[in-house]
Amino acid sequence: MAETDTGVAQGGLDRVIGDAIIAFNEVNVMYPLVSAKQCPPGAITVQWPEYTAVGSSSVGAATDGSDYSTVTSVTTTARSATVSEHVIRADVTDLAVMGNADDISGNTGAILGNAVATVQVAFA
């Protein structure tokens, strides 16, 4: 079995990790995992129901000629969030843009946008 010291590939390793971070930010992993709600114009709170989790233990085996008599309860809890403003800033200089073959402005925008999207807010 061959072993490689990471010091041998260190120059390329930084590029690979940087490219992986950019790819992760472009894919937007978090958005599909959360529910997005629109706030009505003029309102500062958003409301939605939170449903109870139902596990696989609630699923029973079916047999011919029998009626499954166990009823699974699904309840909701009212939740709300107050809309607030957040800000983030990164200065991208012309020297950085002109001195780099990568899309510095576009990548920085994606990174900052995802940072704002992942701000944790307090839910009631």
Image: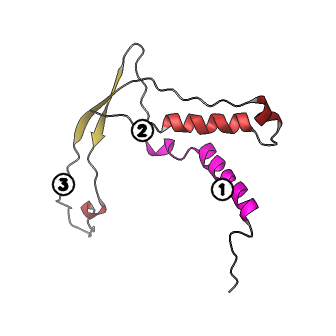
Q: Quadrant of residue 101?
A: top right
Percent position of residue 105, x then y: 71, 33
**86 vs 79, nearest the viewer:** 86
Q: Which residues are magenta?
A: 10-35
What's the residue type where badge 2 is placed?
Answer: Ser
Secondary structure predominantly adopted by residues drawn in magenta? helix
Instruction: Say whether residue 76 is left or right of residue 93.
Output: left
**Residue tagged 1:** 17
Q: Quadrant of the N terminus?
A: bottom right
What's the residue type where badge 3 is placed?
Answer: Val
- Colouring method of the image: secondary structure
**Residue tagged 2:** 35
Percent position of residue 47, x then y: 32, 28
SS class, disc 1: helix
Cβ atoms under marks 1 and 3 closer than 8 Å: no
**Disc nearest the viewer among 2 and 3:** 2
Give the residue displayed 66% in from the left and 37% down from the top: 108
**119 vs 3, nearest the viewer:** 3
CA gap between label 1 and label 3 equals 50 Å
Q: Residues within 10 Å of mark 2 (few under 14, many from 20)?
A: few
Residue 120 included in the magenta stretch of the image: no
Percent position of residue 39, x then y: 41, 22
Cβ atoms under marks 2 and 3 closer than 8 Å: no
CA gap between label 1 and label 2 equals 30 Å
